Structures are given as C-alpha cells and as structure tokens.
C-alpha cells in the first residue's frame, strides 16, 4: 500500500515537481506509526538526499514530523527558549546555558542528544553525574521547567517519533548529510518543545560536520527559514570548530569544566560562548533590550552564583541526591568519575600556539573510550583532556600543555597524534574569534 504513495512522492521529487501535501502528511504519519517497510522509507530518503526538496516542502516535512508526537504547550509569557548546536569538541554550552538562562527568567525545556561520531553529547556528559536521569516524559519535562526554570532530557519517541525512525535509517544509509533532512530532524524536535525563540550554533571547521563556511551558512539559512516558518524567532551563530572549546574535553571532565564556569571561574572561551548564545536568546525574547545587555546578564548570573543554584536544583529534580548535588557545586572532582591515569604532555618548544587540532584530540579521545563506534558501545566517563593553553597564547618549552585522562596505557601512536595536534611558532597569530558570522 505504501509503494504507490512513495512512488508518487519520489516521482515528484525527481521531476522537480512539488510533492502533494496530503501525500507527504500520509507518509509522515505512516513513518511515525511504523507502518511502512524500511526499504520504502529508505527509497524516499535517498531520493530527497540526491535531488533535494524546496524550502516550502522542508517546512511542511518539519511541521509534519513535529506533529507526529507530543508538543509541549506553555501558558503565560512568551519566554520559552532553547539552543541547538550541530556538535563540536568540548561543546559543553548546554550544561551552563540552560541554568544561566533560567536564572535570567527564561524557561528552557531542552532536548539533547548523545555523542555522534567524534562529537560529544550533552546526555552522555550529564549521565556522568550520579543519579542524573535524562529520561523524562513530556509531562515531567514541563513540571521540571515550571519548578526549576529548565530541564535537559534525552530525545525520545514521545516527541517527534517520525524523526526517531527516519534518523535511524539515515544513519545506516549514508543519507545523514542532506540539508533538508538535517533541518527537518533538528527543527521538528525543537518546535515540539513549544519554543518562542531558538538560537542555533552551527559549527564550522575541521572538527565540525560542516567543514566550510559556505556549507555552514547554507545549513543555517535552511534551519532559520524553517524555524521562522513555524513561528519561532530564530538566529544562527556560525562558530569556529577548528580549536577545542574551553579547557575541558570528555564527559565527566566537561561537567567539571561547566561547574567551574558556573562557579564564576573556569574557561573564558566557554563563558564567552555561553554568554553570546544566552545574550542572543535574551534579546530575542525581549528580556534584554540588546544583545550586549543580554550578554552582560548572562555574565552576571555566572558570577553571582544564581546559575549554579539553578543547575543544582535541576540535578536534584532530575534524580541526583541533594547531598551529592551540593558537593558537585562545591567540589565537583569529589563526585564525578575519574580515569585511572593522568599523563601530562609538554610543549616541545617556546612560542605562540598557532592551533590545537580539535579533530585529532576528539579522535584519540574516542579511541581511548570517551566516545562510541557503534550504538551498543558504552562510554568511559572519566576519559578526556584538560587543556592548559589555547590558540594565541605564549607557551614555554617544557611546560604542560595538556593532561590526558586515560585508563589504559597510551600507545606511542596515540602520544604522537596528541603531540602533533599542537602547533607552535614564533609569530603571534591574529586574534582568535569563535563567532564567524550570524544568519538571521
Ligand atoms: N542531529 C539531529 O538531531 N538530526 C540530524 O539530522 C543531525 C544532527
């Protein structure tokens, strides 16, 4: 029965004719209800991947996927917001951003994912906190947001179930890298959160899925147009993903790095990126009159401890025992899992750091157990790095530039790859800027 429907849809796509909206709706409904054979769905996905579809069709697809499951609805002020990042290395922004924005007065019902490929995932990071439960029903998400101001939950089949199956099939059929399919997948889940405002962090560079500015902007334009088409005020920030973000990389280590920032300390790079994303959302929702004002508001709640208080409340509401949550706020290293060994690597010469190859670091971390190679792999939360320097900084010969947290002995091949990820030269490079451009 589905063959005729999918045949008609594919014929339209191949002939560059608009798909019939009733056919598209029937297709999405069938996918959500698991009513069609996987080969038929695969045929449609390959067709979209090869030929593309229009902005109007992408919006209709996104809307259909959003409507395939629960949609959170909110009463009261139009202050429901979220961020989505296309994935990076050391990208711990969500852990800091959600509580910081809640402390500023926004409501943040965040759905997040696990690590994908070489990139880390917010859910894997949070699960290194004892007791933290990311499996929240839509009702529990709402309740947590109403009480605490924010929650962070794993994507699940209660919300946008059509995406669950489409994504699983894309993953094994080489059809992930399609702008309309990525757009519909991400925006359908964000729209189902019932958002008023969304900021998209579209990563660009050697450790991003989008390697060039051209591709990152094309994806950003598609996502912004589609989200706006669904009534969500949206801005995309294209940011550099050549260099690792901040000082901590790895699952438990990124929780540690996030707590440091929430304590008003820690990495400036991490803090500034959180403030940029948060400032944008505060401006979009009208809580801040300008982006600059919004950025200052985020810095203030990071410095005065209000964001840390919300983070602890979120941990407790999501299952962490209160005494552990409090200890996490004060001495995170006492609570978080740690690796068996720490090996420090030294700068091979004096000079300015030209670059630290985030992709090389991520690949080695994944091989050491910080990431997965197949969905059934379990991750080792203590594995990762503390990076003691950054692009542009001066470093002396023999100083520690990175601490590698590992359980098994490091091979000489791993050591070489890590050491080669650092480039030092005599000249100080031009100022390093995370933000490349904005798409509105
Ligand atoms: N993340 C998603 O949720 N969907 C995609 O298609 C890509 C990244």
Image (tube, grey):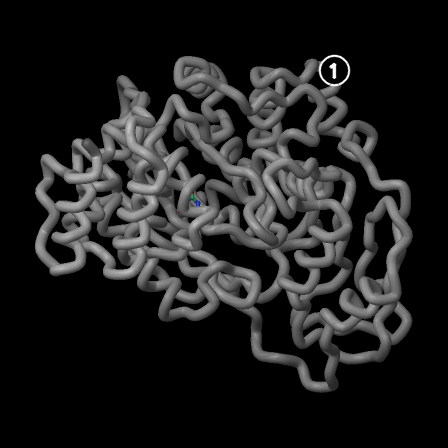
| Camera-side residue of 291 and 7 | 7
Mark 1 close to ligand 1, CB under 8 Å = no
Residue 372 place in picture, x, y as percent: 65, 44
- How many callouts does the rendering have? 1
Q: Which residue is located at x 62 percent, y 16 percent? A: 319
Mark 1 highlights which residue? 323
- Disc 1 residue crowd, few under 14, some 14–19, many 20+, Cα 10 Å: few
Q: Quadrant of the N terminus?
A: top left
Residue that protrudes farthest toward the bottom in the picture: 426
User: With respect to residue 320, does 273 lie above or below?
Assistant: below
Q: Which residue is located at x 57 percent, y 51 percent? A: 117
Residue 71 place in picture, x, y as percent: 30, 23
| Camera-side residue of 420 and 162 | 162
Circle 1 SS class: helix
Any part of residue 346 in sight: yes
| Camera-side residue of 92 and 277 | 92
Q: Quadrant of residue 285?
A: top left
User: With respect to residue 261, does 157 lie above or below?
Assistant: above
User: With respect to residue 5, does 140 lie above or below?
Assistant: above
Left or right: residue 218 compared with residue 262? left
Task: Please state the quadrant of the image where ligand 1 appears.
Answer: top left
Residue 367 place in picture, x, y as percent: 73, 53
Left or right: residue 92 compared with residue 383? left
Q: Quadrant of residue 15?
A: bottom left
Q: Which residue is located at x 63 percent, y 59 percent? A: 244
Q: Quadrant of the C terminus?
A: bottom left
Any part of residue 271 in sight: no
Left or right: residue 253 compared with residue 74? right
Q: Which residue is located at x 80 percent, y 72 percent? A: 395
User: With respect to residue 72, does 216 lie above or below?
Assistant: below
Residue 210 place in picture, x, y as percent: 45, 62
């Amino acid at each position: 029965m589905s063959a005729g429907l999918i045949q008609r849809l594919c014929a339209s796509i191949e002939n560059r004719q608009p798909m019939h909206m009733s056919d598209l709706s029937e297709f999405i409904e069938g996918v959500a209800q698991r009513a069609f054979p996987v080969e038929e769905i695969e045929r449609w996905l390959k067709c979209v991947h090869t030929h593309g579809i229009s902005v109007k069709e992408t919006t209709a697809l996104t809307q259909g996927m959003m409507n395939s499951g629960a949609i959170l609805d909110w009463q009261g002020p139009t202050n429901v917001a979220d961020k989505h990042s296309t994935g990076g290395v050391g990208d711990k922004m969500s852990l800091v951003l959600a509580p910081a924005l809640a402390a500023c007065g926004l409501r943040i019902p965040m759905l997040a994912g696990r690590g994908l490929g070489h990139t880390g995932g917010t859910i894997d990071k949070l699960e290194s906190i004892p007791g933290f439960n990311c499996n929240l029903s839509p009702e529990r998400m709402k309740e947590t947001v109403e009480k605490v101001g924010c929650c962070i939950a794993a994507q699940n089949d209660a919300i946008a179930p059509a995406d669950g199956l489409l994504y699983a099939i894309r993953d094994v059929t080489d059809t992930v890298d399609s702008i309309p399919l990525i757009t519909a997948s991400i925006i359908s889940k964000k729209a189902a959160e019932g958002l008023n405002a969304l900021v998209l962090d579209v990563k660009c560079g050697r450790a991003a899925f989008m390697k060039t500015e051209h591709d990152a902007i094309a994806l950003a334009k598609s996502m912004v147009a589609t989200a706006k088409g669904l009534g969500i005020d949206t801005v995309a920030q294209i940011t550099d993903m050549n260099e690792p973000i901040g000082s901590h990389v790895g699952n438990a280590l990124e929780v540690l790095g996030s707590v440091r920032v929430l304590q008003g300390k820690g990495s400036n790079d991490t803090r500034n990126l959180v403030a940029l994303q948060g400032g944008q959302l505060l401006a979009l929702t009208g809580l801040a009159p300008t982006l600059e004002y919004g950025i200052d508001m985020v810095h203030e709640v990071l410095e005065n401890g209000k964001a840390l208080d919300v983070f602890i409340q979120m941990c407790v509401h999501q299952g962490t025992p209160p005494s552990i949550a409090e200890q996490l706020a004060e001495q995170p290293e006492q609570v978080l899992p740690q690796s068996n060994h720490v090996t420090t690597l030294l700068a091979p010469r004096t000079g300015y750091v030209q670059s630290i190859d985030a992709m090389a670091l991520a690949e080695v971390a994944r091989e050491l157990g910080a990431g997965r190679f197949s969905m059934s792999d379990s991750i080792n939360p203590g594995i990762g790095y503390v990076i003691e320097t950054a692009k542009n900084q001066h470093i002396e010969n023999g100083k520690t530039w990175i601490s590698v947290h590992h359980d098994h002995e490091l091979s000489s091949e791993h050591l070489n790859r890590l050491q080669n990820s650092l480039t030092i030269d005599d000249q100080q490079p031009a100022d390093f800027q995370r933000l490349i451009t904005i798409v509105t």
